[in-house]
Amino acid sequence: MVSRTGAEEKEAAFRELFTKHYPGLCRRLLPYLGDRTSVEDVVQEAFIRLYFRPPAQQENIPGWLFRVAVNLAYNHVRSEERRRKREYQVAAWGPETGDNEVLRQEEIAQVRQTLGRMAPRDRFCLLLRAHGYGYAEIAAVLQVERSSVGTILARARERFRREFSGCERSVTRNSSEQNL
């Protein structure tokens, strides 16, 4: 029987946590960043922080990882906003499976475009709320007062409505121009 050292046990436990939580964390962050490469970078950074600076409270490691990853994602979006606006691309179209699927894919692309044009704070506020997070959690991620979240959320919803309806008009206009 070979006994493990403390470092080996720590690495084995970390590998188990990584294997168990990495895929789910990536899936949960994809709506926030929209880019798989960025999601993987952010999630890896969260695990690096877990490895080198674990939380004092070990009861809810998955929750801690998600909170750290969302904060890292928000920081990533803020620092990369100009580049993301220039390079933002509509999701690739899959094979056409009928008019309903095409319309659904077009609407998804419009939502992503609209979110991509919004300020990072507004985008994160909408996405966090849509995923069921409360005002206190949103305030912690956005680093604002809890009492400001309602106002930020209301304004973000209104901006989304304006941007999305403008996007629909633009798509309709472009489609009719192509038919000429």
Image (cartoon, rainbow, N blue to C red):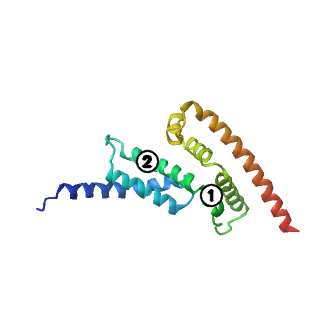
Q: Relative to 162, is 149 above or below? A: above
Name the disc covering residue 68, or none: 2
Q: SS at mark 1?
A: helix
Is 133 on the left or on the right of 105, as rendered?
left
Q: Position of residue 86 (x, y in %)?
A: 65, 62
* Residue wearing tag 1: 82
Q: Where is residue 170 in the image (x, y as percent from the top left)?
A: 79, 57
Q: In the depicted view, which residue is nearer to us: 96 or 42?
A: 42
- Mark nearer the N terminus (2 vs 1): 2
Q: SS at mark 2?
A: helix
* Residue 14 visible to an observer of this rendering: yes
Q: Quadrant location of the N terminus?
A: bottom left
Q: Where is residue 107 in the image (x, y as percent from the top left)?
A: 70, 55
Looking at the rendering, which quadrant does residue 13 occupy? Answer: bottom left
Q: Residue at x 64, y 67 (%)?
A: 94
**Neighbour tally class for label 2: few under 14, some 14-19, many 20 plus, Cα within 10 Å:** many
Q: Which residue is drawn at 57% across and 57% down?
A: 80
Q: Residue at x 43, y 47 (%)?
A: 68
Q: Relative to 111, is 158 above or below? A: above
Is 54 on the left or on the right of 101, as rendered?
left
